[in-house]
Every structure is written in structure tokens, then in C-alpha cells.
Image (cartoon, rainbow, N blue to C red):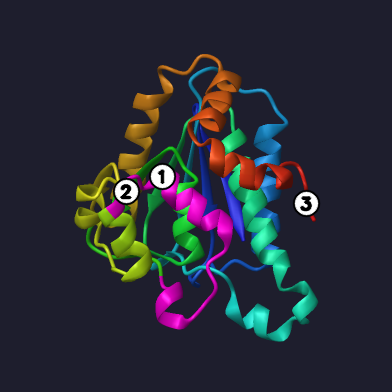
Amino acid sequence: MCTLEKRGNIYLLTLTGSGEHRFNPSLLSSLRATLSSLLSSSHAPNAALITCAEGKFFSNGFDQSWVRSAPPSQHRIISDLLRGLISDYLLLPMPTVCAITGHAAAAGCALVLAHDYVVMREDRGFFYMSELDVGLKFVKYFGVLFNEKIPDNQTRRDVLLRSARLTAREAMDRGIVDRVAQGIEGTIEEAVRLSEEVAVAVSDGSKLAEKRKLMFSETWRHVSAAAGSKL
């Protein structure tokens, strides 16, 4: 599932195991419970959160095996849980850094974009919105999130309408990724460095969360109904 480790003022949230970290109710609920513990507790100034994953995948999106086995009436559960998870990230009273330590695909890309900053492993992995290739429906809050987090029209077109598989360098050139690094440990170390740099300026986390909601007001409008809800 996931673990949370504290390194000084830096929290490290890790998706554990060697699988694809596909989003099903169990994983999403575990992630939301972990973030809930951060949302409900007090933190020292200059704290930050890093999200990373073990294995060759950061996240390969929604768990289609779960979807195929669940009754149709329950299919919306995982989308709503992810919507709530995105709202949790927007509400966190600290900077957030996503360390893409492996492939990020489909809904995994939405989780990446829920963060303030992104570091991506250069020697393995793609940023890849696969919905068009596999014929899956694109949920509305994904579109809003991508519109606000990827403002360049050409990049957004290539990611969403051409299902371009972006390497770390390409994603950085397109403004999706802030920094690149080598290997899993190197990517996490770079994420720690970036976290320490950006956290220095944050003395009041509640004000940071309010600024996020203003900066990404349309995304917040579409996900805020799920804030605090565990479904």
C-alpha cells in the first residue's frame, strides 16, 4: 500500500511493493488516510511532502482488473476516491513534490499533477496519458486539472490527443517536470533537495493551501466536494 516516513521536516510518502501501483479502493483509501493524518496534525514551519513509489512504476492508473470484477454501480468509486485524493493534496499545509521514480500513466499522471513540483527519473519511465490508446473515458476533473497545470496548448494537445510518451527530459522541456535525476535513489535525493529549497519560504502552511486553491480555482471547484469525504 503506502508508508509515511519523516526525515527532519520532510515527509516521504511511498507507494510500496513491486507492482504497478494501480488505483483501486484499497490503495486510494490508504493514501487518503495517510494524507488525512497530515491534514489533521500540526507541523513545524518549513515542512514538505514527497510522494514516490517502489519498483519500475510510479503508477499505471486505475485498476482495470478491479473495474472488470466490480458491479457497474461501484465503478465510480475509484474516480471519486482519486478526486478526493487530489483535493487532499491541494489542501496540504506544506509544499508537495512528486518524485516520478518509474512510469506514470493515465490516472497516475493526474496524481503527478496534483503536486506543486515534480522531479522525474531520467533513465527509466514515461509520462503517458494512455486513455486514448486504450479507449477509456476521460473524466471531467482530469481535463480541468490538465488545463490548469499544463498551460501550454501544444503540450496539452500532444499529451491528451496524441498520447505522447514523454521522457523525463521531454517532460522538463515541456514544463511538466522541474528537475530530472538518475535512478530511484537519485530521484528521491533530488526531490529532497528541491523540497528543502521550496519549504524555506513557507512559514504558514494554511496560507499556502489557500493560494493553491486560488491559483487552481477551477480544479479546486471540481474536486472540493470530495474534500474530507472518504466515500
Residue at which label 2 appears? 176
| Magenta-span inclusion, residue 152 | yes
Evaluate if marks 1 and 2 touch, with contact meaning CB atoms under 8 Å apart.
yes
Label 1 sits on a secondary structure element that is helix
Q: Identify the residue at horizontal 59%, vertical 66% (top origin).
A: 23
Q: Earlier in the sequence, mark 2 or mark 3?
A: 2
Residue at which label 3 appears? 230
Residue 52, compared with residue 11, is above or below; it is below
Q: Identify the residue at horizontal 38%, vertical 68% (top origin).
A: 56
Identify residue type, mark 1: Lys
Residue at which label 1 appears? 149
Residue 34, compared with residue 7, is above or below; it is below
Q: Earlier in the sequence, mark 1 or mark 2?
A: 1
The location of residue 210, given as percent across then percent down, is: 58, 25
Label 3 sits on a secondary structure element that is loop
The location of residue 11, given as percent across then percent down, is: 52, 37
Say whether residue 32 is left or right of residue 120: right
Say whether residue 212 is left or right of residue 87: left
